[in-house]
Image (tube, rainbow, N blue to C red):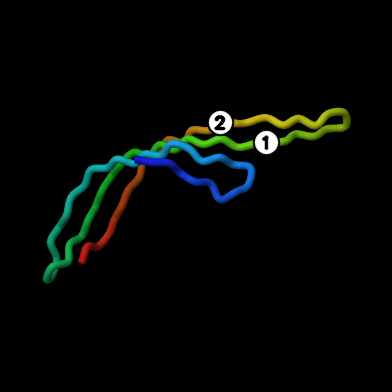
Amino acid sequence: MGYAFAPQRKVNGGFFINPSIGVQYPLAGKMKLQLAVGYELQEFERLKTQTDNQFRKEFAEQLSHHSLSVRLGLKF
């Protein structure tokens, strides 16, 4: 859980969380194979601009991404 930083100029970072649950399988020696499944939530805000023949509009767009995550890794 924490705060996500945005690398783009017109984007503000926001809340970030990625809890997961998984298993470890022992391999040769001290190595272990890890597999985890989790849920990811990230919120951020970006400044959008729309221009047409008569007006130029700027507004803040608040976004929230929800996704499932799968992790596979080696621990040594």
Distance from the alpha carbon under mark 1 to that under mark 2: 10 Å
Q: Report the residue marked by disc 2.
A: 62
- Relative to 74, does residue 12 appear above or below in the rendering? above
Q: Nearer the viewer, residue 28 or 16?
A: 16
* Three-letter amino acid code at the position of disc 2: Gln
Q: How many marks?
A: 2
Q: Earlier in the sequence, mark 1 or mark 2?
A: 1
- Please identify the residue farthest to the right as the structure is shown: 53
The quadrant in which residue 15 appears is top left
At x 59% / y 41%, what residue is drawn? 11
Dot 1 alpha-carbon crowd within 10 angstroms: few under 14, some 14 to 19, many 20 or more: few
* Three-letter amino acid code at the position of disc 1: Lys
The quadrant in which residue 76 appears is bottom left
At x 34% / y 38%, what residue is drawn? 39
Dot 2 alpha-carbon crowd within 10 angstroms: few under 14, some 14 to 19, many 20 or more: few
Q: Nearer the viewer, residue 28 or 4?
A: 4
Q: Report the residue marked by disc 1.
A: 48
At x 29% / y 56%, what residue is drawn? 72
Spot occupied by residue 63 in the image (x, y as percentages of width and height)? 53, 33
- Relative to 64, does residue 11 appear above or below in the rendering? below
Q: Secondary structure at mark 2?
A: strand
Q: Indicate the quadrant containing the N terminus: top left, top right, bottom left or bottom right.
A: top left
Per the rendering, the mark at residue 70 is: none
Q: Secondary structure at mark 1?
A: strand
Left or right side of 41 for 6? right
